[in-house]
Image (tube, rainbow, N blue to C red):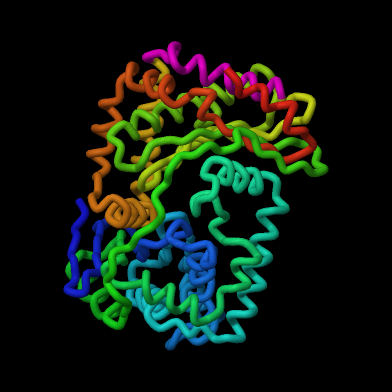
Amino acid sequence: MYELSVLPSGLRVISYHMPASRSVTICVYIGVGSRYEKDCEAGASHFIEHMVFRGSAKYPNSQLISSAIEGVGGILNAATDRESTLYYSKVGSDKFALALDVLSDMLVTPVFDPEDLEKERKVVYEEISMSMDNPSHRVGLLIDEILWPNHPLGRDIAGSRQSVAGLDRQRLLSFMHCHYNPANVVVAVAGDIKHAPAVSAISQAFSGLGGQNIVQTFEPYHSGNPCPVGVDKRDAEQINLMLAMPGMNRLDNRRYAFSILNTILGDGMSSRLFAHVRDNLGLAYSVQSGTEFLHDTGAFSIFAAVDPANLTACIEAILSEMEAAKTTITAEELTKAKEMSKGRIQLAMEDSRYMAKWIGSQELLCRRVNTHEDVIRLIDGVTLTSVMELAGEYFRKPEMRLALVGQIDKEKVSCLLKD
């Protein structure tokens, strides 16, 4: 069971004791991501994530930061998402104090050296270019653009070259001061450390975290009239495609049924899409589906990469499986999907990083934590009827959006999404 403490500053500390573990993971979650940014700030959350690795008061350059953790065999990394930013370190249990010292110093007393900032700006430019050049990455950005048009959710989390160029030191520090405040931070710890000493150490390490404890707000998502098909035409051997539609928010009590539907349709080599599109028809090397749950919306998407000559056949095969899911899912498929989901949870529970992310992300984004026992009970409660009803509710052509990267004309595929 996890334990939760709220410090006088508002910072939350949540822990999960794993006495048999040889490791400990610290996850620092900040309640800010790309959807909290104005157009002129696009990419600020991601740029800040990069900059704190450039140097801090005790560790004044990036080499000192990385070598402190890597020198003891540990892992230090970070990730920016739409609604949160994560910094984490996984080390041997006896190196907890070191990992906490490095992470807290990065976040409480970052240097933001002007010369380093300009160097890192170039690094971010290269990351943006890399995503644009990679067809499988580009198709994901394109589907976001047409799924959430004219909204922060539809932007690249890293921003654009133009927006990143306008992010000077003062703007980044002001953004950080606004969002990196104690009430907007959750520190999650999992591994061979007990709650009381973890709270004591974290309280001291983050005592200097400033900022105003203001209510964090973002622009709500309102569905409009997006373009159903987006194309990035370029020379390539394959066409990368993503078919997506709006999904449900993370607090919807049907999300576990929706996740089971995803497992049956396109998660893994035993899924319906893999069996039909790859094994039976030989149309694609990779085909898979996935879900995303956000504060007020979500998405369901399917990815495949195919030869241009097989594009129409592949899309038709995917649409056929989505239609069939409304009425033909069997009790055997439901049981298999449930057991697959529960088995993955049980295997992942051995990893302190997984456990720290599990409790930290739920506390930050949901303000409540479902234990693994809770989730297994919810998975067991999913019914065959509820899964097929969700397929009927969400798998509708008027809601579908299609993104394509490769040698293709938009007009040739638009008709496929018409009833």
Could you tell whether 321 is left or right of 392 in the image?
A: right
Check residue 105 for magenta coloring.
Answer: no
**Residue visible at 62% across and 19% down?**
317
Q: Is residue 332 above or below residue 8?
A: above
Q: Is residue 283 above or below residue 327?
A: below
**Residue visible at 45% across and 82% down?**
110
Q: Quadrant of residue 127?
A: bottom right
Which of these two is toward me, 346 or 154?
Answer: 154
Residue 270 visible to an observer of this rendering:
no
Q: Quadrant of the C terminus?
A: top right
Name the spot of residue 417 as percent of width and height, x first: 61, 24
Check residue 316 for magenta coloring.
Answer: yes
Q: Outermost residue toward the front?
A: 225
| Number of marks | 0
Name the spot of residue 93 as percent of width and height, x first: 34, 67
- Give the residues in magenta: 312-331
Which of these two is toward me, 264 or 50?
Answer: 50
Which of these two is toward me, 168 or 130?
Answer: 168
**Residue visible at 39% across and 80% down?**
105
Could you tell whether 372 is left or right of 314 in the image?
A: left
**Residue visible at 20% across and 65% down?**
195
Name the spot of residue 86 as percent of width and height, x first: 42, 62
Residue 348 visible to an observer of this rendering:
yes
Name the spot of residue 368 as percent of width and height, x first: 23, 50
Helix, strand or loop: magenta stretch: helix
Could you tell whether 202 is left or right of 120 in the image?
A: left
